[in-house]
Each structure stands twice: as C-alpha cells, then as structure tokens.
Amino acid sequence: MDLHKLLLTKNDCYKANRKIAVKGIMVHSTGANNPYLKRYVGPDDGILGNNPNGNHWNQPRPDGQQKCVHAFIGKLANRDIATYQTLPWDMRGWHAGGKANDTHMGFEICEDNLTDKNYFNAVYHEAVELCAYLCRQFSLTEKNIICHSEGYKQGIASNHGDVMHWFPKHGKNMDIFRSDVKKQLGGVDVANANTPDVWAQKDWDWAKQQGWLDGTRPKDNLTRQEFAIVIRKLVEKK
Ligand SMILES: [Zn+2]
C-alpha cells in the first residue's frame, strides 16, 4: 500500500468534527469515469497533479453536496496507484447516506471506465491492503467490512450499487474481497512472525546474542516500556 495523507480540512464534514466509535469499514467507488486522485483530493501536493477545474473535495460542499470520505484510492499524476487518507479515521464521515456514518469508516475507489483489468487489479489489491491496515488499527476483522450496496440492504446506507456494479466484471465480489482481507490479516503475520526479514537477519541475531533484545517477535512494534529495558541494559553494561 502506498499511503499518503491530505486531510480535507475545508470540507464541512471535517469542520463538523464529530468522533465515532469505529465498528466497521464501508467500501465505495466513485461512480464516475476518472481514475485520478486529483479529481477528489487537493490541492496538489506535488505528486497528485493539478486539478484545473478546482472541483476536488477540499471545499465546504464538493459538487454542491454534503459529502466526505476517509480515504481515496486511485492514480497519482505519474499513474502509480496510491491511497490518500482524507479524514482522521475516527472522525464521522458523510459517505453512507444513512446510519453507517455513525459506525463505519468509508473510502472511495476511483472508477475508470470499469473495463481495464490491470487498473482494477491494482486498486483492488490496494483496497485489500488498506482494509487490513484499518482492521489491525481498530481491532476489526474482515467480517466488519461491507460495501455501499450491502449497507443499503442492511438498512444503514442509501440506495447505491457500489461496488457490486464493478467488482463482478472482474471476477470479484464482496465475499471474495473479505476473504482476501482475511488472508492479508492472517497469512503474512502468522507465517513469518518469528522469522526476521533477510535484510535484518544479521543485526537481529547480533542484538539477540548480545542480550540487548530477547529474540522474540521480530516484526512487532517496540513499545516505550520495552525501549526502557533496552536502555537500562545498554547503560548497565557500559
Ligand atoms: Zn457509495
């Protein structure tokens, strides 16, 4: 995932500044043929590219509507695929047109003309990675992910078809999407949890042998209390 951050601070939704207890993720797609992030995210940060129409969503009411999402996935100016976070994840978004706004983060995948397999596969993979990232951050599972059209069926979102007007054209649906997120959540971590990456192996072994680290959980974050232990060991040995 290529994650960037450009908060839409001029959007009325951002200014409303309401927090939610995050319970799920809603997947949207834009419903318009324009795969470039600059259509929705701005102003240009040097890699998005310039939007000469000035119709991105960093304004009070984009397209004259009250709407805002937590992230967009689409093309940078150089055509690479990227994700832009556009609201704080736990801020109440205006994306579902229903009660899901009180519980779900929402992100938009920028649509193209819906026929380009390469583009679809790239943004689909980016969306899987974004969902896995958010699941980890908010202790969610793949079961907490729905698309807009599923939200409508559950009575918590407005009557839109995304993303099920698009995914099936390329052999995917939301069940497959959820199982791909599950794989991303389970597979990588469990399989390689106790093996450091090749580039870190030598230093990891050294730190373990010297006793600076205890040699467990090579891929986990270092907490402040664990850092304190390492500092004490270093100073005492000196
Ligand atoms: Zn939608």
Image: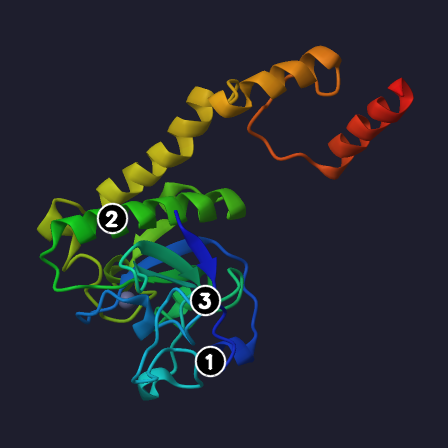
Q: What residue sits right under mark 3 in the picture?
A: 86
- The disc placed on residue 142 is none
Residue, far top = 209
Mark earlier in primary sequence (3, 2): 3
Q: What residue sits right under mark 1 in the picture?
A: 11
Give x and y (percent) for residue 7: 50, 69
Which residue is located at x 32 percent, y 48 percent?
A: 126
Q: Residues within 10 Å of mark 2 (few under 14, many from 20)?
A: some
The answer to whether 43 appears left or right of 146 in the picture is: right
Mark earlier in primary sequence (3, 1): 1
* SS type, badge 1: loop
Instruction: Decide which of 196, 45 is in the foreground and name it.
Output: 45
Q: Amino acid at mark 1?
A: Asn
Q: Residues within 10 Å of mark 3 (few under 14, many from 20)?
A: many
Q: What residue sits right under mark 2 in the picture?
A: 122
Instruction: Specify the quadrant of the image occupied by residue 201.
Output: top right
